[in-house]
């Protein structure tokens, strides 16, 4: 299945890689030499699991107990990176700014500038992101070196960063997961400054890496499609044809590749090849924009080659498909309007993007009617950020609801604690224990005298048994002696009830606040999906009108042909 990371890397133009903060974590030694290291290990454990919520809680605890690693500049940088990854940019921004205002070591300072630039880039503030990136000078943490140059290829597209990118490419191993993306963006930067020849060379290098993994195969298809578009602009149809033939007929870019392949074949007057590509597209989901165009184009090609029956049949099938597609859009609007759809959509987002039989139990909504229309939308920065923020809010809401449910148990514990008493029967049991202790001591003395009459082996066994029992009695007596010193059971301070009640009110207030944010963001997600559905609907209505016009024209042409044939018959031939 296609992962979210693959969609965000491939489907959008020059999308950034996910924020990487491994450089900060690697600044800490793995060897445990103190209690502080053990405490800090809890933070790093959750961090490496990408469980940033738990990692941030562990960090706050470590900070509260004055763990030196948590208070260090590297520790605060790790906190800022996790806050940024968790979707709390304002707090992380404050941390990065505080580190930049201090006398910070160069590597940590450069890392803070990098994260700040990344944060600003994700907030679409390219100007300030560029300014932050310009502040980086000197040593960069080794683990951030590639990410820094990758971000630079996204932000510094005016050409001044090209020599630096070329240098990092020369030292970066080809099996590095960032290499192909840095190379691709480097080629795009070269195109933007007018260096088309070198851009073509680098795009061909990206295409050559497509056999490394399924993810890079998608990137390779995109590079080949870009090369074909460049060749078409230059009027080099044979070169464009060659690149298009190398694009897979399956995969993320297959639809776009097949459609461009068909148009190029038409320009080369290779109509049979164009029809073959369009027939492949014709069998795919009507929710795909390229399929919608292909249906109209296929019928037009049949008409142009002189096959009116095939053209009429294709138009009739296209009309039927467009009607079904418009009905599916209407159903998708109904589904996205249901109350719990955003939460369920986010919960199952990883699995519903790439496969249809994702559920283990019957789902409450039919995502198969919704998902095909939003595949392209998943590459949208605004959509993915909205999903991420909603996902975080749902997690916070779930935790708050859990603690809100615990409030009744907390009150019960406090009420029971206030009613604790040392009853008379408990004092009697303690007095009875004293009598039992005296009796057991006398029996122990008798057993020791009795053991002298036994064989030596039996004496050892009995002595070991007596010693074991005596050890247990000593522990029990110690506990009873402690209990005798207690005049009354432990009572929580009077302030506890007030404090717990205050915390419960705080939880309820935060729950209301979280619900308000969710109610604000859910319509945003629905509006984004509905906007995408609007585009599908408008496009299909346009193509539907074209197919209906073509159908009417073919019917008229057929009737005119029949009338002409009938009028040309001799009078004696009429029945």
Image (spheres, helix red, strand yellow):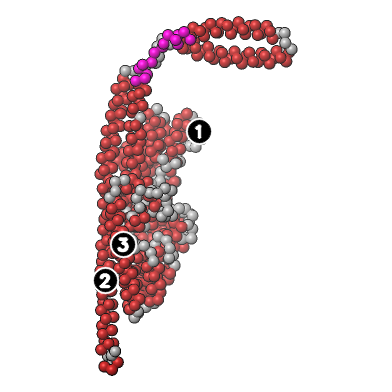
First in sequence: mark 3 or mark 1? Answer: 1
For the N terminus, the image quarter is bottom left
Check if residue 79 falls in the magenta segment.
no
Foreground: disc 2 or disc 1: 2
Q: Which residue is mark 2?
A: 548
At numbered mark 2, what does the secondary structure look like: helix, strand or loop? helix
In the rendered image of this protein, does residue 471 appear above or below residue 94? Answer: above
The x and y percentages for residue 20 are 40, 46
Residue occupying the point 31% across, 71% down: 316
Q: Which mark is residue 325?
A: 3
Q: Residue at x 37, y 19 (%)?
A: 417
Picture layout, residue 542 above or below residue 422: below
Place residue 185 in its image quadrant.
bottom left
Location of residue 13 by image quarter: bottom left
Q: Which residues are magenta?
A: 415-429
The disc, 3 or 2, on the residue closer to the chain's N-terminal end is: 3
SS at circle 3: helix
Measured Cα–Cα span from mark 3 to mark 1? 61 Å
**Is the stretch drawn in magenta largely helix, strand or loop?**
helix
Report which residue position mark 1 lands on: 32
């Amino acid at each position: 299945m296609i992962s979210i990371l693959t969609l965000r890397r491939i489907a959008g133009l020059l999308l950034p890689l996910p924020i990487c903060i491994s450089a900060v974590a690697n600044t800490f030694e793995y060897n445990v030499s103190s209690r502080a290291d053990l405490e800090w290990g809890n933070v790093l454990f959750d961090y490496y699991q990408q469980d940033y919520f738990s990692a941030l809680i562990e960090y706050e605890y470590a900070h509260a107990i004055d763990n030196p690693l948590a208070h260090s500049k590297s520790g605060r940088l790790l906190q800022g990176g996790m806050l940024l990854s968790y979707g709390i940019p304002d707090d992380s921004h404050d941390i990065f700014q505080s580190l930049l205002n201090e006398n910070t070591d160069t590597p940590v300072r450069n890392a803070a500038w990098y994260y700040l630039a990344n944060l600003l880039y994700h907030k679409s503030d390219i100007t300030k992101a560029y300014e932050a990136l310009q502040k980086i000078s000197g040593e960069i943490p080794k683990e951030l070196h590639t990410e820094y140059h990758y971000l630079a290829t996204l932000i510094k597209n005016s050409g001044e960063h090209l020599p630096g990118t070329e240098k990092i490419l020369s030292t970066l191993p080809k099996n590095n997961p960032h290499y192909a993306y840095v190379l691709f963006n480097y080629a795009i930067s070269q195109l933007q400054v007018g260096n088309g020849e070198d851009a073509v060379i680098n795009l061909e290098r990206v295409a050559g890496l497509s056999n490394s993994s399924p993810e890079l195969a998608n990137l390779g298809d995109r590079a080949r499609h870009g090369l074909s578009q460049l060749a078409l602009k230059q009027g080099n149809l044979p070169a464009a044809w060659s690149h298009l033939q190398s694009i897979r007929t399956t995969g993320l870019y297959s639809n776009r590749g097949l459609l461009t392949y068909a148009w190029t074949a038409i320009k080369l007057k290779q109509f049979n090849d164009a029809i073959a590509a369009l027939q492949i597209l014709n069998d795919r989901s009507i929710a795909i924009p390229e399929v919608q165009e292909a249906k109209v184009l296929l019928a037009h090609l049949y008409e142009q080659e002189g096959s009116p029956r095939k053209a009429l049949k294709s138009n009739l099938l296209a009309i039927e498909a467009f009607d079904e597609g418009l009905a599916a859009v209407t159903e998708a609007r109904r589904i996205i309007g249901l109350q719990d759809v955003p939460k369920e959509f986010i919960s199952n987002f990883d699995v519903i993007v790439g496969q249809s039989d994702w559920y283990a139990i019957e789902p409450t909504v039919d995502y198969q009617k919704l998902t095909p229309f939003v595949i392209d939308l998943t590459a949208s920065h605004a959509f993915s950020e909205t999903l991420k923020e909603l996902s975080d809010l749902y997690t916070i809401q779930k935790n708050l609801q859990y603690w809100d449910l615990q409030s009744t148990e907390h009150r019960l514990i406090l009420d029971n604690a206030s009613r604790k008493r040392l009853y008379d029967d408990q004092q009697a049991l303690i007095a009875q224990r004293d009598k039992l202790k005296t009796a057991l001591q006398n029996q122990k003395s008798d057993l020791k005298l009795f053991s002298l009459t036994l064989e030596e082996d039996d004496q050892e066994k009995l002595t070991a048994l007596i010693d074991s029992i005596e050890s247990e009695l000593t522990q029990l007596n110690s506990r009873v002696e402690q209990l005798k010193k207690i005049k009354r059971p432990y009572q929580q301070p009077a302030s506890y009830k007030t404090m717990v009640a205050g915390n419960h009110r705080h939880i309820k207030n935060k729950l209301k606040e979280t619900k308000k944010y969710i109610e604000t963001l859910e319509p945003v997600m629905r509006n984004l999906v509905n906007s995408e559905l609007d585009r599908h609907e408008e496009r299909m209505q346009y193509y539907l009108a074209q197919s209906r016009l073509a159908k009417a024209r073919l019917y008229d042409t057929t009737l005119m042909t029949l009338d002409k044939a009938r009028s040309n018959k001799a009078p004696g031939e009429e029945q």
